[in-house]
Each structure stands twice: as structure tokens, then as C-alpha cells.
Amino acid sequence: MKLSVNAFYILVTSLSLMAYNNVENVVFVWTFNGRSEIKAIRTVGLLLRDFPVALSLDKADTVDDAASSINRQIREAIMHGSITPFIDIKRGEMLDFLYQGDLLEIPDYKELIGIDTPGTQDETAIEPIELQVYEDEKGSRLQILYDAGLYRRESMDRFAMLFESVCSLLLKDTSGDMHTRDIVREVSG
């Protein structure tokens, strides 16, 4: 399995959405280091965001097939994706580029160490649902922020459980030979 950190979590998100919704095709937008509100940006540069992602299951679709598709989509998104330019509110545009890490670097995968799903009842959610992945020396942590006026806690807990299960399966078998359909079927129960 040859996936960057971003591509790994895009694959996990895709398979989790398929399992959650009992569907074989998903299309969504992955925001990489983006900000919804231009005034909230405090870094100089250009923030790549809004990578379109589409994944479809078929009987021959192995994890490696899905990984190749997602890696290709990331490369194309870098070339053609929507961007959010940094604009200094007082001075106007300052700089055209901000390097945000190696999007294609393939890491040594660590175990997912926790899933946190806080509600946002008392806060205004930036998006209806936000998946935020944090990496540190201990591993990875997913935080799911959601608008509690639109989604129930039980729904988010179920999605978090599916997400963690998909991560575990992919990290146990990194050969890339496992079929994506089998992963979705197994985590769906």
C-alpha cells in the first residue's frame, strides 16, 4: 500500500462513507490545510484546498487500485484544485505560495490511537461536518466536529466506529491486496 498520509485518510474516509451509507460510490471534497474564512488565515501564502475525491467499488478494486486512484486524484487536484489565496487584510496580496508539507510522502503507518467526537451544539460549526486528523509522536487522532442541529451524536459515534475499524483493517494488512468491497462489508457488520 503506497499512500501518503492525506491519501490514507482519504481512502479511510471513502470506505467509511460507503459503509455508513451502504453505497458503492462516493464523491466528496477533501480540504487540505484550508480555511473557510479568509480573515481567519494567519499564514502568508497560498493554501491548497478542496480536493475533489471520487471512489467506486467493483469486484476487482483492491486497496492498491484504490490507492492508485486516490494518488492520481491528489496529483490532479494539486494542478487543478480550488485554492484559497492569502490576502493580508491591510495590505492586500502578499505572497503566492505556501508549502504545506509533502502531500505525496509515504509514511510508516502508526496505529490510530483515539477517536473523539465532540458535539458543537453551543458553537457555530464552520461546516456541517469536519473531520480533523491530528498526527503526533503517539500516533493519530481523529476529531469529528459536527453541527448538532443537523446530526445526532449516535450517527457521529457510528461513523467514528466505522472510521476506526477501516483504519485498523488497512493498518493490519498493508500489502494492498485486500479488496475494498470486503473491507466495507466487514466493517458494516
Image (cartoon, helix red, strand yellow):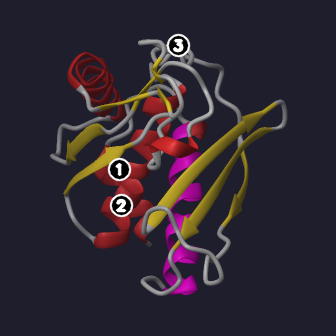
Q: Residue furthest front?
A: 90
Residue tagged by mark 2?
17
- Whether 157 is drawn above or below 162: the answer is below
Left or right of residue 146, residue 67 in this image: left
Q: CA distance from mark 1 to mark 3?
A: 26 Å
* Residue beneath the point at 58% across and 65% down: 145
- The magenta-colored residue range is 152-170
Q: CA distance from mark 1 to mark 2?
A: 5 Å
* Residue beneath the point at 59% across and 56% down: 164
Whole-percent x and y of residue 6? 48, 31
Q: Looking at the picture, tell me which residue is in the foreground, 28 or 1.
A: 28
Residue tagged by mark 1?
14
Task: Identify the amino acid type marked 3.
Answer: Tyr
* Residue beneath the point at 22% across and 38% down: 61
Whole-percent x and y of residue 110? 70, 33
Left or right of residue 30, residue 106 in this image: right
Residue 167 is one of the magenta-drawn residues: yes
Left or right of residue 124, residue 116 in this image: right
SS assignment at label 2: helix
Frontmost of labels 2 and 3 is: 3
Instruction: Report crowding for label 3: few under 14, some 14 to 19, many 20 or more residues within 10 A (C-alpha).
Output: few
Q: CA distance from mark 2 to mark 3?
A: 30 Å
Which of the two discs, 1 and 3, labels the residue nearer the N terminus? 1
SS assignment at label 3: loop
Location of the N terminus by quadrant is top left
Q: Quadrant of residue 108?
A: top right
Q: Are marks 1 and 3 in contact (CB under 8 Å)?
A: no
Q: Are marks 1 and 2 in contact (CB under 8 Å)?
A: yes
Instruction: Report crowding for label 2: few under 14, some 14 to 19, many 20 or more residues within 10 A (C-alpha).
Output: many
Whole-percent x and y of residue 103? 47, 19
Task: Identify the amino acid type marked 1.
Answer: Ser
